[in-house]
Each structure stands twice: as structure tokens, then as C-alpha cells.
Image (cartoon, rainbow, N blue to C red):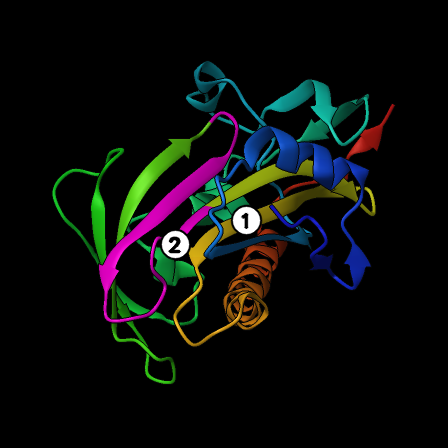
């Protein structure tokens, strides 16, 4: 996979490369292109809170360790129970991608929401497509990883597969999120790998920008307090 994608104007660094090595593995054929993009969001993942504590009333205090890159930093943070303000609460909704994806107008999931579930997505005008059929490949609430594969639709993204992973980080003393999204897709006949990557990455950049805008707007409404680095 091409790891030289630009993230917020900077080359992907060592921390991002390590996350990509661990979570973003794609088998790339000769007629395919692949890359990864990174976004830093000023909103929580959220921090991992045991389910037994989520059920309690009030605002829990998280005491422990958060992986913020190379090594582990000890932190103490007061985390709001309003999970709707977290980045992961938006990303994990396979049944409602329109919560942050600006080009999705409607989504219908067939049957129960589980691994292997299919969703029918209606695409807004302005793109060379109107529908897309997508399958849920992975939904990991512990590692904060979502993977989908496009299996149909009236578009040219054949054998498209993507992985998006979320990682906690500290941004200006507050809980933030490092988002990495990678993909692999066939290069359509008549197009080059560079042209295909440019088109796909433009879509992903729009989605990640929208994800940041929505998450950060919701985070302002949350009660998350600055993290006290110890």
C-alpha cells in the first residue's frame, strides 16, 4: 500500500505508519491502486470506558493509560457520558453514513446489522453514480476499526475495499482523534493509477473533513474537560 499520502499538509509520520502496519493491510493486485489518508480531529474517540462503568450514572473519571503514539502516557481525564459527541459514534454507524458523509442522501440496510450486512446507498447528484451496494466486513468497537467493501452499484469503483481506524491522541491538552482511512480499488479501463487515486482520495478527503466538522461541533456541546498530563 502506498504510504506516502499527504495528511493535513504533512507527510505521514512514524506513528501513523505503525498504525497502518497493524490495522491497514490490503492485498493490492497489479491492476489496482491503494493509498491512505490521515486526519486529526479535535474531538474524542472516545477514550475506552469499561461497559460496567458506562452503565453507571454520573460522569466517570478515567484513570490509566492512553496510547498516544510511541509509548504510553499516563493521563487523568473526566469524560462525559454523552457518547454521541465522539468520533467513533459517527464512524461506526454503518447504517447511517449520511451522518457525516456529504455525498450520501439515503441509506437502507438489509436485515439485521451484523458482519456481512449489506447497505444500499443513494448518492447525491454531482457524482458519476446514483447508487452503491456495500458490505460490512469488520466492526470492532474495542479497536475502533470499520471496514467495508463495495459489491455493486452504478459506478466504476470495482473491488473497492476500505478500512478506517480511530486512535486517541492529545491535541492542545484535550482528547482528540487520529483518523486513518485506507483503500484499494481496481483501476478502470481508460484511466491511470494516478487518476484513480486522485478521484478516490478527493472523496475521502471530503468525508474526513465533514467528519471533523460534525465531530468538533458536537464536542463543543459535550462536557469533556482538558486532559491533565501527569
Name which residue lies at 81% across and 58% down. 10
Q: Which mark is residue 182?
A: 1
The answer to whether residue 87 is above or below residue 68 is below
Name which residue lies at 66% across and 52% down. 38
Name which residue lies at 65% across and 23% down. 61
Name which residue lies at 76% across and 36% down. 15
Quadrant (top left/top right/bottom left/bottom right) for the N terminus: top right
Using a 10 Å C-alpha cutoff, classify the residue at mark 2 as few (fewer than 14 neighbours), some (14 to 19) or many (20 or more).
many
In front here: 186 or 176?
186
Q: Position of residue 224 (x, y in %)?
A: 65, 41
Marks 1 and 2 in Cβ contact (< 8 Å): no
Residue extending farthest right: 230
**Quarter residue 208 falls in:** bottom right
Range of residues picked out in magenta: 142-162
Closer to the N terminus: mark 1 or mark 2?
Answer: 2
Residue 63 covered by magenta stretch:
no
Amino acid at each position: 500500500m502506498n504510504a506516502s499520502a499527504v495528511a493535513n499538509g504533512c507527510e505521514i509520520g512514524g506513528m501513523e505508519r505503525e498504525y497502518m502496519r497493524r490495522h491497514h493491510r490490503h492485498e493490492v493486485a497489479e491492476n489496482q491502486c491503494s493509498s491512505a489518508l490521515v486526519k486529526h480531529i479535535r474531538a474524542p474517540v472516545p477514550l475506552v470506558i469499561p461497559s460496567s462503568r458506562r452503565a453507571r450514572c454520573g460522569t466517570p473519571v478515567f484513570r490509566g493509560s492512553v496510547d498516544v503514539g510511541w509509548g504510553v502516557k499516563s493521563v487523568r481525564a473526566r469524560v462525559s457520558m454523552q457518547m454521541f459527541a465522539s468520533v467513533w459514534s459517527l464512524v461506526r454507524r454503518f447504517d447511517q453514513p449520511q451522518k457525516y458523509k456529504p455525498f450520501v442522501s439515503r441509506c437502507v440496510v438489509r436485515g439485521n446489522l451484523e458482519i456481512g450486512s449489506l447497505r444500499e446507498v443513494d448518492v447525491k447528484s454531482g457524482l458519476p453514480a446514483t447508487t452503491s451496494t456495500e458490505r460490512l466486513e469488520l466492526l470492532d468497537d474495542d479497536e475502533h476499526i470499520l471496514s467495508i467493501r463495495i459489491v455493486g452499484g452504478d459506478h466504476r469503483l470495482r473491488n473497492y475495499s476500505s478500512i478506517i481506524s480511530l486512535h486517541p491522541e492529545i491535541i492542545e491538552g484535550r482528547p482528540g482523534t487520529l483518523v486513518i482511512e485506507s483503500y484499494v480499488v481496481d483501476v478502470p479501463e481508460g484511466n491511470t493509477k494516478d487518476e484513480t487515486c486522485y478521484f478516490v482520495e478527493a472523496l475521502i478527503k471530503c468525508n474526513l473533513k465533514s467528519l471533523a466538522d460534525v465531530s468538533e461541533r458536537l464536542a463543543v456541546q459535550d462536557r469533556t474537560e482538558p486532559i491533565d498530563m501527569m
